[in-house]
Amino acid sequence: MFDINYTFHWNQAFRALPDMLAGAWITLQIAVLSMVIGIIVGVVLALAKQSRFVAARGFATTWIEIARNTPALFQVYMIYFGIPAVLQLVASWFDIDFRAMGINIFYLDSYWAVLVGIAFNNAGYLAETFRGGLRAVPDTQTRAARSLGFGPFDAFRLIVLPQMFRAVFHPMTNQMVWAILMTSVGIFVGLNIDLTGVTQELNARTFRTFEFFALAAAIYYVIAKIVTSGARLIAWRLFRY
């Protein structure tokens, strides 16, 4: 009934493994940088969400709502296509010809678009995670620190923040794995140097779709397992007391 005559050629995929591993390094690079940015911005957003200032709360709420309730691909698209369009509109308002100056502000490199898009998404999710972590730290910790002579900033930086990160360690690990996998959306904005981009280019040249994407999936799996295993070792050190 079915005529299946597909022949596997794994040797082509394994010969291209160095190129795929180079792409995996770019994938990991984007994920780590987006997590670093996301953590920094996420802490600021979490504090802003709890601020008594309406403008700060509104800004944080808007960021979080967009990041958590729209597709990640949409966010990357808006950064890749939207930012140049907005800059072009502003330039037309002020009658500025950047191209005459030799400056091309209307093109955003796909690498940076994916990095900023994933960082934007991470910050939104981590902000809510951090807000929960901050609530998990008793107010008595801050009062005790102040009674020992700590200023408000030092009490937060040295007492509250470490306890918050300890409380949200496992959700941060999950977010890191999510960031690694989410880099694959870069293929839709022309990113061809990460693992998915390299795999697609190899597939387009050889038409060995199953072999290359199966190998790419295995590499993603190994990277995710390394991250989760490393996090488990760190957690053993953090939570053994």
Image (spheres, rainbow, N blue to C red):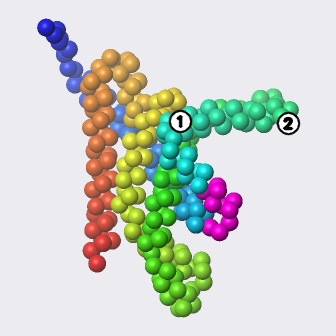
- Which x, y percent locates residue 78? 59, 36
Identify the residue at image location x=55%, y=39%.
Answer: 75
Q: How many marks?
A: 2
- Amino acid carrying label 1: it is Phe
Residue 100 falls left or right of residue 199 = right
At label 2, which amino acid type do we have? Answer: Phe
Answer above or below: position of 29 versus 195. Answer: below
Q: Which mark is residue 74?
A: 1
**Which label number is shown at residue 94?**
2
| First-in-chain label (2 vs 1) | 1
Q: Residue at x 48, y 70 (%)?
A: 134
239 up-or-down from 80: above or below: below
Q: Is residue 121 above or below residue 135?
A: above
In the displayed structure, does residue 211 sit left or right of residue 42?
left
Residue at 64% x, 55% y: name it.
Answer: 59
User: Could you say whether the residue bearing mark 2 is in a helix, strand or loop?
Assistant: loop
Say which mark, if any, is on residue 149.
none
The part of the chain drawn in magenta is 51-60
- Quadrant for residue 207, please give it: top left
Query: Looking at the picture, how far across and down is residue 110, in whole percent?
Result: 55, 34
Across and down, in percent, residue 223 comes to 32, 46
Chief SS of the magenta region: helix
* Residue toward you, 12 or 182: 182
**How busy is the neighbourhood of tag 2: few (under 14 within 10 Å), some, or many (20 plus)?**
few
One can see residue 40 in this view: no
Q: Quadrant of residue 26?
A: top left
Residue that lies at the very extreme toward the left in this rendered image? 1
Q: Quadrant of the N terminus?
A: top left
